[in-house]
Image: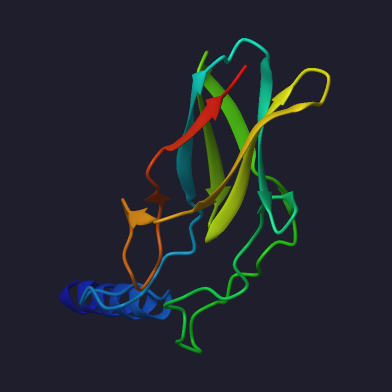
Amino acid sequence: MIRTRVRLLAILALSTSMAGCSIDGGDDCLAVAWASKVSVELTGDTGDVKTIELLCDGSPCQDGTVERLKGLENPNEPTPVPTADVTDANVTQVDGDTWTTSFMLDVPDRATVRAIASNGEVLAERDVIFEWKRVGGSELCGGPMEAEPITLDIRP
């Protein structure tokens, strides 16, 4: 009976270590996704604003995947396969004058923010440089970040 328990404990310990679990709290990173966000606050004559655009290098900012996954340098660990899906950054109206946008995994350093009317007219435009601050995760493994809100003044 004792031998059976010892064998079971040995098998459990071996299977746990082979599954890539780290008991010592090492530098292993989980392969998880996160979203980083920034708010756009409109001021002035906001009645005609239909949507907000964020442009990166002249095209809509994109959500994509980071090709390298930090912290997964152990050749014995399975390597996640990054997806190739790329979509426009998600821009959502929170209330009448506040919009938020999120980026999956990777964030831009700079962008052009535009307020657009229903007829496509650009009502206001501003170039911004983001100063991202980590709000979760770690430097080694990454994690969600936030930038200071962007103010965009709409003039009549």
User: Residue 46 appears in which quarter of the rendering?
Assistant: top right
Which corner quadrant holds the C terminus? top right
Of 28 and 96, nearer the camera is 96
| Left or right: 73 in relation to 88 | left
For residue 105, above or below residue 114: below
For residue 94, above or below residue 18: above
Across and down, in percent, residue 143 comes to 40, 58
For residue 68, above or below residue 62: below
For residue 9, above or below residue 83: below
Of 28 and 66, nearer the camera is 66
Across and down, in percent, residue 74 comes to 45, 87
Identify the residue at image location x=46%, y=86%. Answer: 73
| Left or right: 11 in relation to 69 | left
Across and down, in percent, residue 121 comes to 79, 26
Which corner quadrant holds the N terminus? bottom left
Give the total number of marks visible in the rendering.
0
